[in-house]
Image (tube, rainbow, N blue to C red):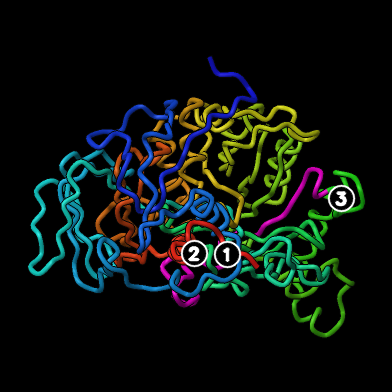
Amino acid sequence: MKREGMVRHGLAAAPGGRGGGGGVPQGISRVGSRRCFRLQDAPAPPRRRGGSPVGPAVLLLAVFFGGGMAGAGSAAHGQTAAGRGQEAGPGPVALVGGEVHTVSGSVLRGGTVVLAGGRIAAVGREVPIPPGARVLDVRGKVVTPGLLDSSTRLGVVEIGSYAGTSDGSSANPRMTAAFQVAEGINPYSTLIPVARVEGITRVVVAPAPEASLLAGMGALVHLGGPKLADMLQKNPVGLWGALGEQGSALSGGARSLALLRLREAFEDARDYDRNRAAYAAGNRREYSLGRLDLEALLRVVRKEIPLVLEVNRAADILMAIRLAEELGVRLVLSGAREGWMVADELSAAQVPVIVRPSANVPSFEALGATFENAARLHRAGVKVVLATFDAHNVRNLKQEAGLAVSYGLPHEAALRAVTLSPAEVWGVAGDIGSLDVGKRGDVVVWSGDPFEMMTSVEHVFIEGREISYETRQKALLEKYRTVGGRPPRR
């Protein structure tokens, strides 16, 4: 029996490993099952030249600290790799014989996916292979679209405790809504390879509120690199703000003040738009926001992008719905830890919700937090999107999805919540999110069920090109192979 507060643990397979596939090569089953990893099942430690094994402490250092340490060289950013990481290049690639989860349609067992020119060229069972194509036998494997994390700090936070590597928020009260997080994204961040080798091919990079309850505009990027101009798919993708405790604290200490601030800001934006000439001549009253912030709000007013509000308490969620109806804007809710308590209202208002399934620890504005939040929202008809809300652990998106499945979210709904549903929310479903002909070639081949902890990634394609599988963790592992089984002393 499931109980609140109980966390199900597992041991994730190392990126690129083929062992322990877990599981379910011919079909997706045993989702969320409890599994044990015994020490005697683990492979023997690798031996360096001379016969000395690398000690477990060194392996743990490489795996667990690799994502957040400085150094470790530039190998993580290479665009080619030997063996299974061989760069696909511009030529066609055929993935033959796998269990193909198109997301938009049925599951094709023994299906083939053909990539050409950066796009999906063909999907089906009886698909001709283009002459000269690189053919990969993926029988017994699972093939899905690349995963999309809808709320991250990836590329704008490298070391959270050092402000010099954090570019995801504005401390300038006169430059908040207009703040574009995209211009601060570091395409060479060592955290990006760590995410993409785990099957995450695209992310939304979201700003965080700091000087105002209006945080700025987020961007949707792919993780293929290496140039930011090439990575940007949609910018801006939404305008972020905060209600609840955070919005209250940034507005003078009361929730009603946050609502007043938002109403005033949108009223000023509309007035500015109607009276541009008078504003330019200095014949309008003083506005609550600067000109650039007003221009940013007009994107929301014109419904070019949604207003994304971070909110958790059920009462605050209902107020956000009423506010969006009053302002006449598209709304997306982020967090929504008590969303299940007002699921019917969210469904009736057709408001999508971005949630982190593992967020079940209660707080004063989320006393009703539960692992079953995503499942209950889905049952009520709410469009559910999953996210990690992180920078260093974006790779855990598939585990968040697995946790949601183990607490009641249907497997196909969980896969959709990290592929096609977010693409629909951000207005790019015609381009990504499913394995359909003409869409961008973001494809992942898994050793088994993508949401099982022991499943490993076999191949990742972004824009039709196979990525490098080098990461900082692997670079650290290779570095410490040569130190006699223990870290060097200083």
Residue at x 70%, y 27% (from the top left corner): 368
Q: Judge from the rendering whether residue 272 lies leftward or rightward of residue 201; answer left or right.
A: right
Q: Residue at x 39, y 29 (%)?
A: 31
Q: Is residue 120 left or right of residue 442?
A: left
Residue 327 in the image: state x and y as whole percent: 71, 51
Mark drawn on residue 455: none
Which residues, given as a range, are shown in magenta?
Answer: 220-247
| Residue under pointer 2 | 483
Percent from the top left, x then y, of residue 161? Answer: 73, 61
Q: Tell me the CA gap for discs 3 and 2.
A: 51 Å
Quarter of the image where the C terminus is located = bottom right
The verdict on residue 453 being magenta is no
Kindly identify the amino acid type of the residue bearing the numbered disc 3: Ala
Was residue 236 drawn as part of the magenta stretch in this picture? yes
Q: Which residue ends up furthest to the bottom in the rendered image?
A: 281
Q: Position of residue 117 (x, y in %)?
A: 25, 70
What residue sits 80% from the left and 50% below the top? 247
Packing grade of label 1 (10 A; few <14, some 14-19, many >=20) is: few
Q: Quadrant of residue 222?
A: bottom left
In the image, what residue type sits under mark 2?
Answer: Val
Q: Are marks 2 and 1 in contact (CB under 8 Å)?
A: yes
Residue type at the position of mark 1: Pro
Label 2, residues with CA under 10 Å away: few <14, some 14-19, many ≥20:
some
Residue 488 badge: 1
Q: Which label lies toward us, 3 or 1? A: 1
Q: Nearer the viewer, residue 346 or 124?
A: 124
Q: Give the mark nearest the N terminus, 3 or 2.
A: 3
Q: Which residue is mark 3?
A: 249
